[in-house]
Image (tube, rainbow, N blue to C red):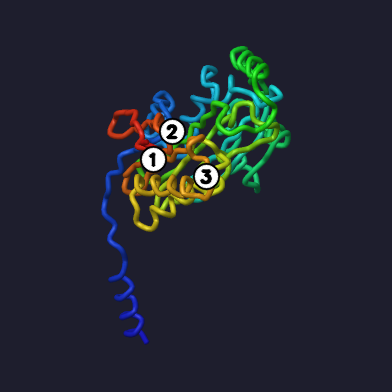
Amino acid sequence: MIACNSEQNKKQVSKAPIVEDVIIKPIVIATWNTPIAVNEAAKVLESGGTALDAVEAGCRIEEANIDNQTVGIGALPDRDGNVTLDACIMDDKGNYGAVLCVENITHVVSVARKVMEETPHAILVGKGAEEFAVSEGFKREKLLSEKSKKAWENWKGTSKYQPIINIENHDTIGMLAVDKKGSISGACTTSGLAYKMRGRVGDSPVIGGGLFIDNEIGGAAATGLGEEVLKTVGSFLVVELMRQGKTPQEACKEAIKRIVSKPNSDYKNFQVAYIAVNKKGEIGGYSIHEWFSYNVYREGKTKNITSDYYLKT
């Protein structure tokens, strides 16, 4: 019996994986041209912080930027003049938290993290999310700036009160990070469609839509018309395509192809774009139309990359 156990132990030891020291170089990738936010996330990573801390810190920069009318304070309102914000965050362990249709709170990405870490839930919405934020120490403040109020008032004079695709300017900041340990996390924060119908929520705070992380494979984030991203579970699709062996660039391109190849797709009249990073540190980005770009931090430098795109004719 002793000899038998000894042989089993030898076999088990021989099968143990050999762990090699690997130097991971931190990476941050974010939608659009948001270098200050990306650099803030990079500071966290370079000081030894986690990818989760990095994406939260980076997104908070744009939430506090009153000149960014698509995120946080100063964002454009819905059709009734209410600024409502959506955000989500996802860590390397597969944990996820989100808040939807939140009013009067600027840093919704941080509220989303609180939902993930301090509650048994994944999603809180509306007044309940706002009340939870206040209970966690977040302060209520007026989100509608004079600039955004004036833009809304001008819109009311010329636009119909009904959903019309691609008449409103909108955007999102989606951010992915890889820390020195090789762990991947991501976050999204947005005010959604400008002049949207009251209560509308897009893809940004929805797991698998605007954001998805699988620490064994990589992460992806989306921007553009959220309704179309949701219909193909876009960010989840990108990660699953990477699982099948595609590079981040190939995966983003295939995810866009899934949208434009749908029957009766009106893709010529809306924009969708994806960014992605895999466990190897490879990155990718692709969009339907031109004009999309994304920022990447690696090896001490932040660069804005003009995305390749589908509609070239």
Q: Position of residue 163 (x, y in %)?
A: 65, 33
Which sits in the foreground, 19 or 232? Answer: 232
Q: Is residue 113 visible?
A: no
In contact (CB < 8 Å): disc 3 and disc 2: no
**At label 2, which amino acid type do we have?**
Thr
Q: Position of residue 124 (x, y in %)?
A: 67, 41
Identify the residue position indicated by label 1 in the image. Answer: 310
**At label 3, which amino acid type do we have?**
Ser
Which sits in the foreground, 220 or 98? Answer: 220
**Residue at 50% across, 43% down:** 211
**At label 1, which amino acid type do we have?**
Tyr
Q: Judge depth for marks 1 and 2 and give the one in front.
A: 1
For residue 151, the mark is none
Distance of mark 3 from mark 1, alpha carbons?
14 Å
Instruction: Tell which residue pokes out farthest to the bottom in this image.
Output: 1
Identify the residue position indicated by label 3 in the image. Answer: 265
Q: Secondary structure at mark 1?
A: loop
Distance of mark 1 from mark 2, alpha carbons?
17 Å
**Residue at 62% across, 46% down:** 122
Q: Secondary structure at mark 3?
A: loop
Q: Is residue 86 visible?
A: yes
What quarter of the picture does the C terminus occupy?
top left
Q: Judge depth for marks 3 and 1 and give the one in front.
A: 3
Identify the residue position indicated by label 2 in the image. Answer: 31
Q: Position of residue 264 (x, y in %)?
A: 54, 46
In contact (CB < 8 Å): disc 3 and disc 1: no
In the depicted structure, whether residue 15 falls above or below residue 131: below
The answer to whether residue 282 is left or right of residue 222 is: left
**Figure quadrant of residue 17:** bottom left
**Figure quadrant of residue 50:** top left
What quarter of the picture does the N terminus occupy?
bottom left
